[in-house]
Amino acid sequence: MPTIGFLHTSPVHVPTFTALLAELAPEWQAIHQVDEPLLAEARQNGPDAPDILMQLQSHLTQLKEAGASQIVCTCSTIGGIAEKQGEALDLPIHRVDRPMAAQAVALGPILLVAALESTLAPTSALLADEAARQNRALQVDTLACTEAWAFFEAGDPAGYHHAIANAIRTQLDHSATVPAAILLAQASMAGAANLLADLGIPVLSSPRSCVLAVTSP
């Protein structure tokens, strides 16, 4: 049975991706590894700090040794660094947000939304990379709804998702332009998409699109 190894920086992602895999690709099994302090360290020292890289390499190696034939890093802050380790490990390593970013670039002007400031730079770089791959012009506005993060840290997903949705609505109300897509940069933000269904604008989140991309033949 093919196996995906998931590297998370929050345990909330374990049931999300387990359920998605069971729904979309039941022939695959999952191995999960969670390192919560890794995100805090990456926010403080930068995702490319030497100690972060050493810890990443250790986690990825452990997932490979446990039988993973593919690995997904579900943290957008460190996903780009993780993705670059694939060649050294001789294993496909995916950042959770790349399929979503490819979709967003194809749609047109993007509102990039993050609940952590540390996510904006790596996700913006990812969008630029995808725009170059697709040979498309890139137009991105950013929104950091950092007040929402306190709800996540308090274990209040409903409050977290409502705070994100409210911040997006406020941004759109005060913007002179309408984006072609709203991109929720972090996997934990996916639940906010359901609260914005009435906007008539595609609201893209990463968990489902990543699982579909990784498990597709």
Image: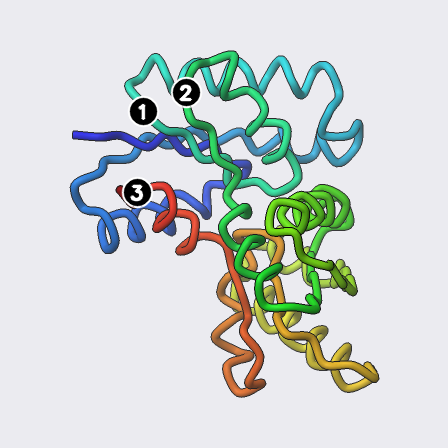
Snapshot quadrant of residue 113: bottom right
Left or right: where 189 falls relative to 66: right
Residue 42 image point, x, y percent: 71, 31
Q: Is residue 44 above or below residue 88?
A: below
Q: How many callouts does the rendering have?
A: 3
Q: Earlier in the sequence, mark 1 or mark 3?
A: 1
List the residue tagged with mark 2: 91
Q: Are marks 2 and 1 in contact (CB under 8 Å)?
A: yes
Left or right: where 183 falls relative to 3: right
Q: Secondary structure at mark 3?
A: helix
Residue 43 image point, x, y percent: 75, 36
Residue appearing at x 77%, y 30% in the figure: 46
- For label 3, count other residues whose C-alpha is less than 10 Å away and answer few (under 14), some (14-19) or many (20+): some
The amino acid beneath tag 3 is Thr
Q: Earlier in the sequence, mark 2 or mark 3?
A: 2
List the residue tagged with mark 1: 69
The amino acid beneath tag 2 is Leu
- For label 1, count other residues whose C-alpha is less than 10 Å away and answer few (under 14), some (14-19) or many (20+): some
List the residue tagged with mark 3: 215
